Amino acid sequence: MLQLEAIPAIDFQTEAYKDAYSRINAIVIEGEQEAHDNYLTLAELLADEKQELIRLSKMENRHMKGFQACGRNLKVTPDMVFAKEFFSELHENFQKASAEGKVVTCLLIQSLIIECFAIAAYNIYIPVADDFARKITEGVIKEEYMHLNFGEVWLEAHFEESKAELEVANRQNLPIIWRLLNSVADDANVLGMEKEALIEDFMIAYGEALGNIGFSNRDIMRMSAQGLAA
């Protein structure tokens, strides 16, 4: 108990905190906007799932507004220019895949990589968040698991014909996540979020998702290691 009391409380009003928060808050806002747009794109590619995908996109829009409110609560202006650049590689890869009709690649980027990235970040953030942001984030993360589940269910049902494309898409996109995590490690640390914990949470969630789709443990280890090749 004494050890717990020795941990200094985070001061959410310092300039250093607000400066780091301006970028982290922008990333989650932009991430939810990207997800909203990506699900609408997927709704056009997967006509049979159109209504469900539109429903998911509306959820992401609500999440975005919730995180915008978190920034306003701390009187922080999110650095959206930084956030758009942050997601640019994944954004371009998703747009290229969707233009080519590669539904499997689109689902891996959005429903697996981005959702697992979000879930990991939100799980690590909740214990160190201010009270207002904690309530918002706890509500958001419950719904993110539903989005992850959509991609898992569809890809599991189409696993055999999707496997080869999934492996290529993993090799192209997983290294980007490592670079993104490294690029915000310092800001995340200011908010009380350890890079090692973020990486661990992401890899656990992503590995479980690959397993739920149908990949073997050996496949998952091999595919996860490809992220380190960047």
Image: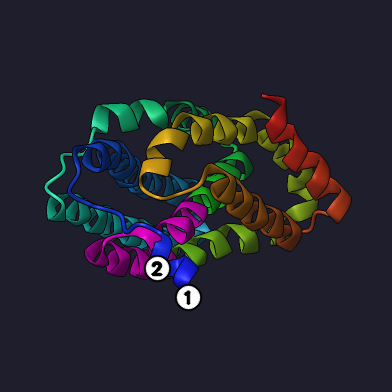
Q: Which stretch did the figure color magenta?
A: 118-142
The amino acid type found where label 2 is placed reads: Glu
Local secondary structure at mark 2: helix
Local secondary structure at mark 1: loop
Question: As displayed, is residue 161 above or below residue 95?
Answer: below
Q: Residue 165, position in %: x, y? A: 72, 38
Left-right relation of 103 to 69: right
Residue sitting at the far bottom: 1
Q: Residue 208, position in %: x, y? A: 69, 60
Q: CA distance from mark 1 to mark 2?
A: 6 Å
Residue sitting at the far front: 2
**Tag of residue 1:** 1
Left-right relation of 230 to 197: right
Question: As displayed, is residue 106 above or below residue 86?
Answer: below
Residue 9 image-quadrant placement:
bottom left
Quadrant occupied by the C terminus? top right
Left-right relation of 197 to 34: right
Residue 155 image-quadrant placement:
bottom right
The amino acid type found where label 1 is placed reads: Met
